[in-house]
Structures are given as structure tokens and as C-alpha cells.
């Protein structure tokens, strides 16, 4: 199957937050002589920055898929299960990464723009993107 849409958004906000936090932890704990916990926290934050460094969304004729960073986890849904797609704005408190609550999921690496998918099951999935019009058009085609 050929792809009809593929877009990769860099996770600028996620990278900045993780790296600034790593630097702060390093200085705060390192200055107190707490070396191993500081190194462990810094390593964890660097791994998180790498894992959530980008969000790639792919729309194919029968499937929508997306993955973060290097693609260790890939999410897929059949396009036939999508009832509607609409451009929405996330609130700042929704954050970045993966956010879940019953019947609702958000996948986001940076910014507030997203495309909200309402599924036939009643669930809602929001995919953060810096190309909401392109993604919505690809899903509508």
C-alpha cells in the first residue's frame, strides 16, 4: 500500500523541557554530592527526550498509524473505524507525551494544534501536529 500522507513533527517543547530539567537536576543534586541519583535522573531524562523527540503520523488508504521518536511503539487504527476528524486546540494543561483518561487519549510532542478523531466506539484520540490542515485533509480523502 502506498502512503497518502506522512508527517514528522519535531518535539521541540519536549526536548527543551527534558534537557533543561536534566541540567537543573544535575546542578541541584550534583552540588549536594548526590552523584548517582543525579546521574540516574539525567540518564532517564535524556532517554525520555530521545523517545519523545518527534511524532510521525502516517495515513495510508486503509490505516492511520503514528509513533514517537525512533518508533519503538507504533499505534495503528483502521481508517474505517474513524467516524470524524476535526482540527482542535489542546489546552496547555494537557501537556506533552501520551495522556489518557477513560475514552480519551492524546499523543503530542509540541504545540497546541491537534486533530481530534472520534471513533465509532465512542473513544476520542487527539494527535498533536504542526500540520493540522494537512492531516485532516489526508483523513478526509
Image (cartoon, rainbow, N blue to C red):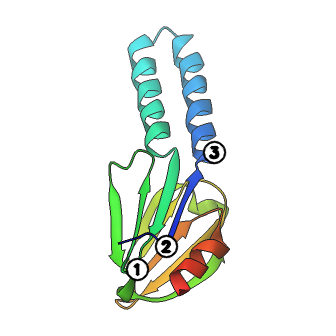
State which tag comes first along the sequence, 2 or 1: 2
* Residue 23 horizontal side relative to residue 34, left or right: right
Q: Secondary structure at mark 1?
A: loop
Comparing 135 with 47, the one in front is 135
Which residue is under mark 1? 61
Q: Is residue 77 above or below residue 29?
A: below
Comparing 121 with 92, the one in front is 121
Which residue is under mark 3? 12
Which residue is under mark 2? 4
List x then y, in percent, for residue 12. Answer: 63, 45
Whether residue 90 is visible here, answered yes or no, is no
Residue drawn at x 53%, y 86% as measured from the top left: 141
Picture quadrant of residue 133: bottom right
Residue drawn at x 50%, y 38% as measured from the top left: 49
Cα gap from disc 2 to disc 1, whole angstroms: 7 Å
State which tag comes first along the sequence, 3 or 1: 3
Q: Secondary structure at mark 3?
A: helix
Comparing 94 with 140, the one in front is 140
Q: Are marks 2 and 1 in contact (CB under 8 Å)?
A: yes
Whether residue 15 is visible here, answered yes or no, is yes
State which tag comes first along the sequence, 2 or 3: 2
Q: Is residue 39 above or below residue 126?
A: above
Residue drawn at x 48%, y 63% as measured from the top left: 57
Amino acid at each position: 500500500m502506498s502512503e497518502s500522507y506522512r508527517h514528522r513533527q519535531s518535539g521541540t517543547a519536549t526536548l527543551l523541557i527534558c534537557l533543561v530539567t536534566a541540567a537543573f537536576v544535575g546542578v541541584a543534586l550534583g552540588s549536594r554530592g548526590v552523584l548517582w541519583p543525579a546521574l540516574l535522573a539525567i540518564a532517564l531524562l535524556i532517554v525520555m527526550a530521545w523517545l519523545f523527540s518527534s511524532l510521525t503520523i502516517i495515513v495510508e488508504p486503509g490505516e492511520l498509524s503514528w509513533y514517537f521518536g525512533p518508533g519503538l511503539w507504533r499505534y495503528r487504527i483502521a481508517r474505517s473505524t474513524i467516524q470524524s476528524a476535526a482540527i482542535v486546540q489542546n489546552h496547555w494543561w494537557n501537556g506533552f507525551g501520551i495522556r489518557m483518561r477513560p475514552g480519551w487519549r492524546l499523543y503530542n510532542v509540541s504545540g497546541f494544534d491537534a486533530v481530534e478523531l472520534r471513533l465509532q466506539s465512542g473513544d476520542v484520540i487527539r494527535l498533536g501536529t504542526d500540520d493540522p490542515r494537512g492531516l485532516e485533509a489526508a483523513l478526509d480523502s
